[in-house]
Amino acid sequence: MQSLIPKQQYALRRNALMQWMGADSIAILPAAPQHIRNRDADYRYRQDSDFYYLSGFAEPEAVLCIIPNRPQGEFILFCRERDREREIWDGYRAGLEGAIELYGADDAYPFSKLDEIIPSLIEGKKRLYVNLGAQADFDARVMTWVNNLRAKARQGAKAPAEFVMLNHLLHELRLYKSADELHVMRKAATISANAHIRAMQKAKHGLYEYELEAEIIHEFMRNGCVAPAYNTIVGSGANACILHYIDNRRQMQHGDLVLIDAGAELDHYAADITRTFPVSGRFSAEQKAIYEIVLAAQLAAIDAVHPDNHWDKPHSVAVEILTQGLLELGLLQGSLSDNIEQGLYREFYMHRTGHWLGMDVHDVGDYKVAEEWRQLEAGMVLTVEPGLYIAPDNQKVAAKWRGIGVRIEDDVLVTKNGHEVLTSAAPKAVADIEQLMRG
């Protein structure tokens, strides 16, 4: 399937990267490897995010090269050739012609010719941009090319003198989302929000967690998302207190809360939403008390997503409100400042309030620059996801609080003058959730 991002956008990305690379350089990036699930069954293939960001090319067994100022063309793609027999078994391939016509490559060569052609592209370049450490087999191949050139130094061959990590430049580009990217992310967010609504409408006593997961995946796939962006979490009862719970095998009971953390992936772009709601359709007094604290913290943290603030501001705002709420309920003792300074709240809130979001659900981009929290800027997308988790075996608190886990998460775009909540279609106010579930 062709990318939802226009082909011209990929060319703009490559040009931006080349401006940072400078002359006398070359960037080499391999496609993601295929992975065996068991025996001769593969996992569904998913392209490496960096590779896809620069090319829109979704096939395995491929390598792209970007060479600034190369007279014959700056974008070279190595890929599989057309093969009628293999295409009958495995699906269509773009081939060399498609690499040029569909994906804008200036030149395309068979993947089998890597060892023959790439050394000649590397020779004479001062800098080699590559992501060492990502794929050990490919790292070894790159070093073989470079060492072979070094061995021919007396014959006039010249190997690159510098190795530069490509992801340092590339991930800075990926941090700022274009209008085309945001169009796809908004669609992924809307599909994901509708999946959460569907789960709320279907939830009832006696269902298994995996049945709600099935409803969510159904909503994803019927809208063109072939896979979730990450393993879907459906944690009911005390399972909501397990941050990355994915077993999803428990039978839900009347009186449970169920925490669902699920997001669709559309054209390699992720959504990431968490909603917590009562299986019965009505919060108990204790559940509502915890939920309202988390919601207040989330709303305040979202308000702190603004170009005037740095990355850590939403987290610090959320921590203060969560801690104050725990003190008011008697789950913590002492002063607000002491509890925050000593990190006592971490018994109930042990993770950060968000992360970057984009092609990866925990997307790329530095959170600090020169040891200082990064300033938020227009075009960045992050999650805001505070929570409170009261372990079922926590003997320090009254039994009525034990086993309550709540997290509320939205995807938030930083705009020029503030923010936009991409996932606002998924209800989160207590009254709205209860009304939806009664409907």
Image (cartoon, rainbow, N blue to C red):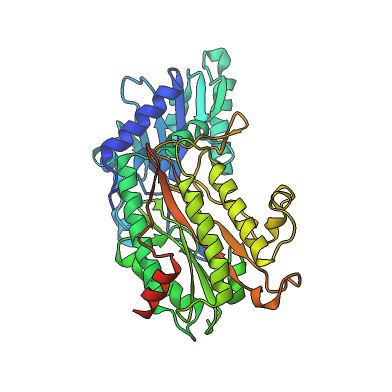
Q: Position of residue 123 (x, y in %)?
A: 48, 21
How many numbered tags mark residues here?
0
**Residue at horizontal 52%, vertical 65%?**
292
**Residue at horizontal 41%, vertical 74%?**
200
Q: Residue furthest bottom?
A: 206
Q: Position of residue 359 (x, y in %)?
A: 43, 47
Q: Position of residue 256 (x, y in %)?
A: 55, 79
Q: Nearer the viewer, residue 329 or 369?
A: 329
Q: Nearer the viewer, residue 69 or 290?
A: 290
Quarter of the C terminus within the rendering: bottom left
Q: Nearer the viewer, residue 150 or 427?
A: 427
Q: Is residue 365 above or below residue 128?
A: below
Q: Position of residue 141 (x, y in %)?
A: 54, 36
Q: Is residue 197 above or below residue 60?
A: below
Q: Residue 393 occupies which quadrant of the picture?
A: bottom right
- Left or right of 112: which side holds 292? right
Could you tell me if residue 33 is visible in this image? no
**Residue at horizontal 46%, vertical 22%?**
25
- Left or right of 177: which side holds 327? right
Q: Is residue 43 above or below residue 215?
A: above
Could you tell me if residue 92 is visible in this image? yes
**Residue at horizontal 41%, vertical 55%?**
271
